[in-house]
């Protein structure tokens, strides 16, 4: 069994009070970040060892679904944060969930994969994976097949309606240590791409589970994991190893097109021609997606960056030991930030129509913020 190493993504102690900090606007505009509501996601206050709360919130109609790594998954009113239902799950939920047509699919730390009614939290079906699950699921809505990876390096393909197993693939890993995490599979036509803790990226036939090709990318002796979810763009796929490199490969054969000599942990994001890369060296890079050339880099004061999300012409991400940060994607200049205390380990969820950003903090508190240009809150926020 692999011994998981939990990254030190947010152990610095901040003041118990949240604070709001706004930078001067650029080009004579003011960008405002205003807290709307906050909710503790645990049933009771956590007095034990801090866990890695890294689930991105999920919108399900008027509900906001949020899991924590302590005791379960809950649903809140996205408008005002009122609790609607709570499902108790031993050891909680770390990876992000998937919501589709009134059902929520989530891989949990209690060794089960669940399909829940999104409105009530009632269980529809569950599958015992016999190991904790750290990977966000992927749904192919054409075939109705769910894909996810357990922490035991087992790939599951399940029928979304019933949970019936279609195929599984088990991969052996002889390494003694692994970074805690798991990549979300990626899909292109009938090709499924999965990264493993042995440093390999594998292309499967999505319907049968047969291997099409594999490339053993990270051969480092310590942390060989590919925990950054593969990202498909056209005929290319991008993926990184924690203490290895960022790779751009061809989808058809897995050949390396270019690589960058810095590892990464969080998922990648493409906006236009730019690839935003949160590195394991504590920086966020903007790269030309065609050739990997660096356009700019943003240095975090401490910790690692979460996955980047586009938001109203900006980009937004969390710092594992500090703030939610808004940057100009062209220059990498900071526009504004919000500090919840004890960092942010999960990528934020954005709702541009309502000018909202949602995220869970390292302390398992769920925040709803309003963020936009040329707007000032009616009531000043006092920390």
Image (spheres, helix red, strand yellow):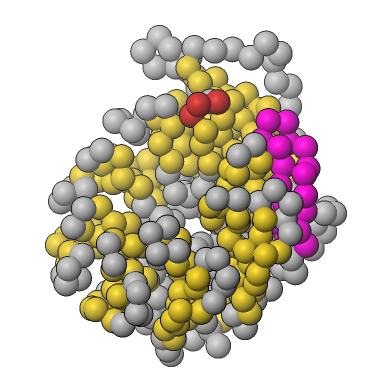
Residue 183: quarter of image = bottom left
Image quadrant for the C terminus? top right
Q: Is residue 10 visible?
A: no
Which residue is located at x 25 percent, y 45 percent?
287
Q: Position of residue 141 (x, y in %)?
A: 42, 58
Image quadrant for the N terminus? bottom right
Q: 49 or 40: nearer the eye?
A: 40
Which residue is located at x 60 percent, y 50 percent?
102
Q: 33 or 57: nearer the eye?
A: 57
Q: Is residue 375 left or right of residue 20?
A: left
Q: Position of residue 268 (x, y in %)?
A: 36, 52
Which residue is located at x 43 percent, y 41 percent?
309
- Residue 74 drawn in magenta: yes
Q: Position of residue 150 (x, y in %)?
A: 52, 75
- Residue 110 drawn in magenta: no
Q: Which residues are magenta?
A: 72-88
Q: Is residue 65 visible?
A: yes
Residue 339: quarter of image = top right
Q: Is residue 53 left or right of residue 76?
A: left
Residue 379: quarter of image = top right
């Amino acid at each position: 069994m692999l011994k998981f190493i939990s990254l030190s993504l947010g152990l610095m102690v901040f003041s118990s009070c949240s604070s709001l900090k706004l930078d001067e606007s650029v080009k004579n505009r003011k960008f405002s970040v205003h807290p709307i509501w906050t909710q503790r996601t645990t049933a009771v206050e956590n007095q034990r060892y801090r866990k890695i709360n890294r689930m991105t919130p999920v919108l399900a109609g008027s509900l906001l679904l949020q899991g924590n790594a302590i005791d379960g998954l809950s649903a809140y009113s996205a408008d005002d944060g009122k609790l609607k239902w709570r499902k108790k799950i031993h050891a909680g939920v770390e990876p992000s969930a998937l919501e589709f047509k009134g059902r929520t699919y989530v891989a949990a730390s209690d060794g089960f994969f669940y399909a829940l009614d999104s409105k009530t939290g009632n269980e529809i079906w569950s599958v015992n994976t016999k190991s904790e699950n750290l990977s966000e699921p992927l749904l192919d809505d054409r075939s109705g097949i769910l894909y996810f990876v357990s922490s035991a390096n087992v790939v599951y393909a399940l029928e979304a309606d019933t949970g019936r197993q279609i195929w599984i693939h088990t991969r052996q890993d002889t390494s003694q240590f692994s970074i805690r995490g798991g990549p979300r599979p990626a899909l292109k036509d009938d090709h499924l791409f999965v990264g493993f803790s042995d440093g390999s990226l594998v292309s499967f036939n999505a319907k049968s589970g047969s291997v099409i090709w594999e490339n053993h990318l990270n051969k480092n002796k310590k942390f060989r994991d590919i925990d950054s979810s593969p990202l498909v763009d056209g005929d290319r796929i991008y993926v990184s190893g924690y203490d290895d490199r960022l790779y751009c490969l061809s989808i058809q054969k897995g050949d390396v097109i270019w690589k960058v000599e810095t590892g990464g942990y969080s998922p990648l994001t493409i906006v236009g021609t730019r690839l935003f890369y949160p590195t394991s060296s504590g920086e966020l890079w903007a790269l030309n997606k065609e050739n990997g050339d660096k356009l700019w880099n943003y240095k975090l004061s401490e910790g690692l960056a979460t996955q980047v999300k586009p938001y109203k012409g900006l980009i937004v991400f969390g710092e594992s030991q500090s703030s939610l940060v808004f940057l100009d994607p062209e220059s990498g200049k900071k526009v504004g930030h919000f500090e919840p205390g004890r960092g942010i380990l999960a990528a934020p969820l954005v709702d541009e129509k309502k000018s909202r950003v949602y995220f869970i903090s390292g302390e398992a508190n769920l925040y709803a913020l309003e963020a936009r240009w040329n707007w000032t809150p009616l009531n000043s926020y006092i920390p």
